[in-house]
Image: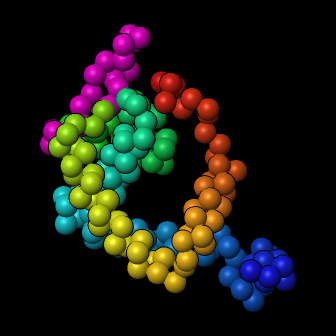
Amino acid sequence: MTTSHAGAAAHPGATSPRLSYLVFRLERRIRGHLDDALARHGVTTTEYMALSELRLRDGPSSAQLARIAFVSAQAMNQVIRDLEGRGLVLRKPDPRGGRVLRVRLTRAGLATLRRCDRALDEIEQVMLAALEDQSRQALADHLAECARALHPEPEHAADLP
């Protein structure tokens, strides 16, 4: 992207769409494809996000998952209850005591997550077909940096209640 084009995308009234608008539009298109693909596996997008985070984090609470997934604590609690009822996650009391319940994937949850991952792989393959591997990695790195800039996570997010 040239400097003049990048500058135009960053200012209102420019001839090119704003970068944040392009990201939003992409997110909406991804979400539509993702909702359809995950529904075939009996999983919602919010459930998939929760399962994915459980693969990355060791025993977060429902409240932590809610913050990560941008849903209310009440909504995530319902998601976790539904996943638990289907045997995809299990909740256990925090070993440090208190009322916090730590959530973990079950074998069935991991298997479901892997099936859903394959569906997402297909979506990403279509979306990224025109990009070379180096550009894909750069895009991933830049998007992660943008996300951190707007919402830095505590260093030990999994340790917070």
Residue furthest to the top in view is 97
Image quarter of residue 59: top left
Q: Give the color scheme: rainbow, by chain, secondary structure or one colour.
A: rainbow
* Quadrant of the frame with the N terminus: bottom right
Stretch of the chain drawn in magenta = 85-103
Q: On the rendered structure, is 57 left or right of 38?
A: right
Image quarter of residue 21: bottom right
User: Is residue 118 or residue 43 the one in the foreground?
Assistant: 118
Q: On the rendered structure, is 132 left or right of 36?
A: right
Say whether residue 28 is visible.
yes
In the depicted structure, whether residue 158 falls above or below residue 146? above
Residue furthest to the bottom in view is 15
| Picture coordinates of residue 143, whole percent (x, y) | 61, 61
Image quarter of residue 156: top right
| Picture coordinates of residue 60, whole percent (x, y) | 41, 31
Say whether residue 74 is visible.
no
Residue in view at x 43 percent, y 36 percent: 57
Look at the image and say whether residue 92 sits in the magenta stretch.
yes
| Picture coordinates of residue 130, whole percent (x, y) | 52, 83
| Picture coordinates of residue 29, whole percent (x, y) | 44, 75
Residue in view at x 80 percent, y 82 percent: 2
Count of numbered badges drawn on the protein: 0
Residue in view at x 31 percent, y 18 percent: 93
Residue furthest to the left in view is 86
In the depicted structure, whether residue 102 falls above or below residue 40? above
Look at the image and say whether residue 155 sits in the magenta stretch.
no
